[in-house]
Image (cartoon, rainbow, N blue to C red):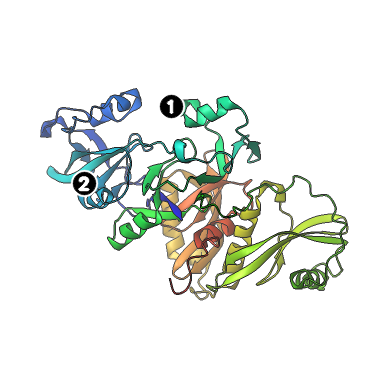
Amino acid sequence: MYYKLNRNLHKSGIGLEESGILGDDSDYGGSVSWFQVFSGAKYEKLPNSYYDLYPMRIRGTSKLKDYLNYALNPFFSQIVSKNLMELLRRSILGAHSFFPLKLVQKEKIIDDYFVFKFDQSIADWVNIDKSIFYFSNGLNDPIPFTYSDDELKKRFNASNSTIMPSSLQTKRIVLDKSFKLDFFSIWNISSGQVVSEKLKNAMEEAEITGVSFEPWPELIIDDGKKVYDVKLIDKKIPPIEAKPDLSHPAVQQMVDWIKSPLEFGQEPEGLVILDDRDLLWPTQEIKRCYLMAYTVNGDNFIGFAGPTEWTFLNIDYSKLSIEELYLRYVGWYIATFSPRLDGDKSIATDPDLLDFIKHLKTEGYTNMLCTQRKNLNGNVYYEIRGKDGVKDVIIVGTADYFEGTSENVVLPFYDRIGRDWDPFDLKRTQNS
């Protein structure tokens, strides 16, 4: 399993709320401006012998963490503490350099930070035939993108990021089994950095501060075993005419749910199993799960069966892949059946929520209204609708790690909870 490395913004030091970085401070020595070196085209011309950078002045209110929320070129450089640098040096990094960097805060010189420069393309390890990419047309409608064109293959392998289309998205990236890096960036696919599970565990054990980790199940190593197809559900599911095979227990379970007076109150005209696989269920058990396409009164739906049964109504299935639909059903189950840990606390009077909204205002969000909240094992998840400038957005996540999504995203609250649980990681069990 690989993880996206996210800068932990909320109350975590140098972040958007207190940006901290004031600029070069030549009064305290140095011979090379880090601003000139690490921005724009001059970044790639940095000689490895340059290490005597001008000190960086930061605000007196900024809290220093191991991983500072600032980098002029975040795809290829970060600022890290000495402790984190030493941990990274014990990992497999690829091409990289560390440059000592002094910080100046309230006229005090802090000299145990480093600029971590990394420039390692992983293109040579990508199995293009098994990986799946999409373009975004700006309306959240993914458009399949294939590498049948040799020129497009060359673009993916190119080292110049300006060649790649910025709208490229991924549903699955498959890397060759020889890939061993613990830290890398896929600048032409996803912002931020990626770490291996080994490095994530080491950072957590060392109590590295200023970061959080987001599972990335779409990035996998090709071990020669079956890789589930990651495909968008058909734009228009034709009416299902095949009669349900009631000899299959899961089919019988789904049909019984559909027939319930609390649901549709009648049998489906047709039903087929769309997909089935093992998932790590929130009970810490491996459960066989099913997605079933069915038709009732001429309308088409995709329901879930196995450890429970449910069907999302009034959603656009065509915007989701099979995996994305599984994530939302798992997230729905966790949000619906996990015990409440915050009693009868009202959303309107929740002081933590009020603090969170206050923080979001400092990041430019306006007109905010909390529409969902769930306390899961001490982590409170929020869904907050608001505006980012003139755009309508939905903010989902915890106060420590959140993201703004378009209103066109399908069920983002359940998606976020499902991703954090990661039902595809079958190795993570109760005893692990």
How far from the left and from the top, in percent, is residue 2?
A: 44, 53
Three-letter code for the amino acid on which mark 2 is drawn: Gly
Q: Is residue 205 visible?
A: yes
Q: Which element carries disc 1, helix, strand or loop?
A: loop
| Disc 1 to disc 2, C-alpha distance | 38 Å
Marks 1, 2: nearer the viewer: 1
Rendering quarter of residue 144: top right
How far from the left and from the top, in percent, is residue 6?
A: 40, 49
Between 377 and 225, the residue placed more toward the observer is 225
Cβ atoms at labels 1 and 2 below 8 Å apart: no
Residue at the extreme front of the image, as rendered: 224
- Residue behind mark 2: 60
Does residue 394 appear left or right of residue 292 in this picture? left
How far from the left and from the top, in percent, is residue 213?
A: 41, 55
Above/below status of 182 relative to 274: above
Q: Quadrant of the C terminus?
A: bottom left
Dot 1 crowding, Cα within 10 Å, few <14, some 14–19, many 20+: few
Dot 2 crowding, Cα within 10 Å, few <14, some 14–19, many 20+: few
Q: Residue at x 71, y 47 (%)?
A: 318
- Numbered tag placed on residue 92 in the rendering: none
Q: Residue at x 61, y 68 (%)?
A: 333
Q: Which element carries disc 2, helix, strand or loop?
A: loop
Q: Earlier in the sequence, mark 1 or mark 2?
A: 2
- Residue behind mark 1: 160
Between 26 and 174, the residue placed more toward the observer is 174
How far from the left and from the top, in percent, is residue 99?
A: 21, 38
Three-letter code for the amino acid on which mark 1 is drawn: Asn
